Image: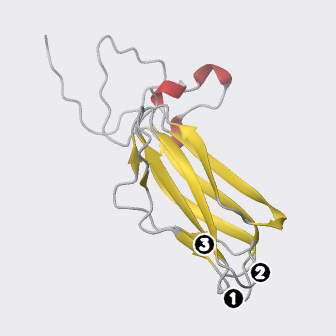
Amino acid sequence: MTTSDVRGTHIFHDSVTFAGATYLPTETVGNAEIKTDANNRIASTKVVHRIDLHYDQVGGTDVVSETKELRICRGEGTLLGVKVRPKTAPTGGDKAFTVDVKKAAEASGSFSTLLDSVVTVNSSSADNTVQDATLISDPTTDAEDCIQIVVTASGSTGSQGQGVQVTLFYEEDPS
């Protein structure tokens, strides 16, 4: 087999066919080089999937404690961020609620947090204002892990918050 080393800029005006493997430098092919017509789509098994997981308690009613499973992971993934938006924040007294995001391995009921600390919404929080969660240093998941959200309402005086929206920004490898 003969090896050739061609250097410099070359322009080919007709088609070029490579008979063997073709190697491109890292970061050579970007979004602009990917055609948008239906016949040239990249298969879902070859791209990282970005998924927004949503949780909501309706406005106009007190936020209540609730634990809810949001996803069974298809492949390995990473939690990229969590945003919490109280529709109406608690007022006066000690009423508050917290939001936590947890994961558990398949066949395990033992959940561990993906947050450095829970997001706390209390009387110092503002209505309709987003609070960002701080994630643990390695907020990754494995295939078949379960992701859950835990909302915990607390306090006995004042007015509880009315409604909350939570969005988890999650990225998952294809399986």
Given this view, does label 2 or label 3 mark the residue nearer the observer?
A: 2
Instruction: Indicate the amino acid at tag 1.
Output: Gly
Residue at 48 percent across and 52 percent down: it is 102
The CA span between labels 1 and 3 is 21 Å
Rendered-image quadrant of the C terminus: top left
Residue at 68 percent across and 53 percent down: it is 55
Q: On residue 93, which mark appears?
A: 1
Q: Which residue is mark 2?
A: 159
**50 is higher (above) or lower (below) than 84:** above
Q: Is residue 1 left or right of residue 24?
A: left
User: Tag 2 or tag 1, which sits nearer the N-term?
Assistant: 1
Taking depth in this image into account, of 129 and 109 the one nearest to the observer is 109
Q: Which residue is mark 3?
A: 131
- Label 3: which secondary element: strand
User: Tag 3 or tag 1, which sits nearer the N-term?
Assistant: 1
Q: Is residue 106 left or right of residue 95?
A: left
